[in-house]
Image (cartoon, coloured by chain):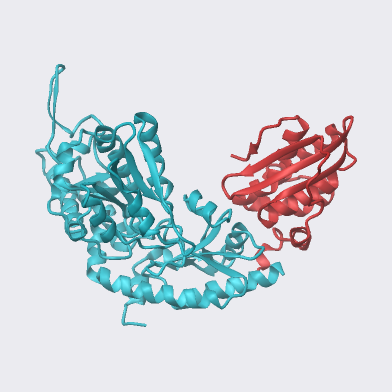
Amino acid sequence: MTNFPVEKIRADFPILAELIRNKPLVYLDNAASCQKPQAVIDSIVHLYSHDYANVHRGVHTLSVRSTDKFEGARSKVKDFINAASDKEIIFVRGATEAINLIAQTYGKTNIKAGEEILITAMEHHSNIVPWQMLCEQTGAVLKVAPINRQGELIYDEFEKLISDKTKLVSVVHMSNALGTINPVERIIAAAHAKNIPVLLDGAQAIPHMAVDVQALDCDFYVFSGHKLYAPSGIGVLYGKQAFLEAMPPYQGGGDMIRKVTFEETEYNTLPYKFEAGTPNIADTVGLGAAIDYLNAIGMDNIAAYEAELLDYATEKAKQIKGLRIIGEAAHKGAILSFTLDRIHPHDIGTMLDSLGIAIRAGHHCAMPVMDFFEVPATARASFAMYNTKEEIDVLMKGIESLIEVFG
Amino acid sequence: MFDDLRDLYQEVIFDHNRNPRNFRVMDNADRKVEGFNPLCGDRLTLYLKMDGDKITDASFQGSGCAISTASVSLMTEIVKGKTEQEAEDLFTKFHEMTTGKDENFNLEAVGKLAVLAGVREYPARVKCATLAWHTLDAALKNEQKSISTE
């Protein structure tokens, strides 16, 4: 292993010291949600203990402090993904809300009956259903680019589906069910060649790699804080300023207006136009703290360490007879989805839980992916920067034992 | 290694999972209902042969976890020869046992279905055990539509 300070990092996550069913916790459900470092927990306690009041327009000291912290978090997010301006960072509840926002604002105004939205066959339900809802409302058509048996996008087929009717490409950066990292640079270049904007669902990618939205040149990028070691209930919609300026607001209310009379309302400037009502102040501050924490470690270091973990886990898993890995893309993040001959994933999940190992068993909100691989569900071990090779050994030993018990 | 799980995964359950009883399509079935647990993707098709209000044969097809497979396998064995009312009473008792609301539940009341009592300690797995019985309930009420645990 590299000199990655995993033990030091583990010590920063209090929950990793929990005993589950009297055994040390082995937490491998990070693709569903990550655990939180003490720095994030402390940031919320500190805000509520010393600096809390409602944000924006307050003239008293606490409101100024709270606003500074809240807007400070926005700047941290901007730097973290290298957006051009704070105005391009809209706070939402999570990636799901961000996609719904784009569908109901950008989508509703720009995608007409018969026009198309192009996604892939490996999308999470959150990048399928909002588009189906839009199609229902407007008569637009959802097109789906196929994947191959390794769980990779069939790029040529994808490119063939780009047509004069395509008005938006919305693609997952990294698949939560398969681990596949999509060739987003190629996708964006191909779409832009026909003036089609691209939305990247970064919910799964964001904790695993450095993301530079300007280098990618994507038009929208969305992610959730809770998969990035930050609290649940806070997420980010990045959009290029020109798009955001042209889009109508999503929800109406306080904060998103500049001037209201009963005759008409003038909307606020970016990013506030899309942030109606009192925002999730504390969790936003928590997101800022998570970004500080990750910056101190370095996203490239995290990516390199996790690649080692995935290689190790994949190699070990391949030695287990009857284990089938679902998702073997050449370019893949730290997710190991698998099935075992004649043992249902839910039995795997319950048995591993009795050993203190948390994995996920189910369809991972990607039922079309399960249908494609003709499995009802998979078991999924997903890794984070605080996992170790020793934990992977515990997992593999557990899998071998349960195969033996099932006989 | 899995000592904590002995109450949930008894040997009888492994046996029924490995060799499910009455696992076949019934061509001349009088009742046929599909059960589905969307949470985990378990699917089963239950077939019943009736003589008046008596269940003369029961069989199933489908795929699911060990708990759900053992549950439906055991169920098809136990309901054969029972009247609709007797089967419904058993469903009620089975439901009481698996949801665990009655601490003094008499396990003898459900015969060999008692091997599934362990699920009451695992709320996430109760539906695996009850899917078969909800499907039977629908079949007895002669509902032709698919039933779902959700």
**A188 and A46: which one is in front?**
A188
Give the quarter of the image for residue A280: top left
Residue under the point 18% across and 36% down: A273
- Residue A20, relative to residue B55: is it above or below? below
Chain letter for red?
A: B
Q: In the rendered view of the protein, which quadrant contains the N terminus of chain B?
A: bottom right
Left or right side of B115 for A222? left
Q: Position of residue A392 (x, y in %)?
A: 49, 74
Q: Give the percent coordinates (x, y) of residue A22.
A: 56, 67
Indicate the quadrant where residue B35 lies.
Answer: top right
Relative to A345, is A100 above or below? above
For the image shown, how many numbered marks are present on the structure?
A: 0
Residue drawn where x is 50% and y is 49% of the image: A367
Expressed as whole percent of the image width and height from the top left, the position of residue A140 reads 35, 35
Q: Residue furthest top?
A: A263
Name the one closer to the observer, A149 or A47.
A149
Could you tell me which residue is drawn at 31 percent across and 71 percent down? Answer: A302
User: In the rendered image, what is the letter of the chain coloured cyan?
Assistant: A
What residue do we see at 36% from left, 29% from top? A137
Q: Foreground residue, A140 or B108?
A: A140
**Apparent side of residue A48 relative to residue B133 in the rendered image (left or right):** left
Q: Is residue B33 visible?
A: yes
* Residue A231 visible in the current orientation: no
Query: In x, y percent, where is residue B30?
Result: 82, 34
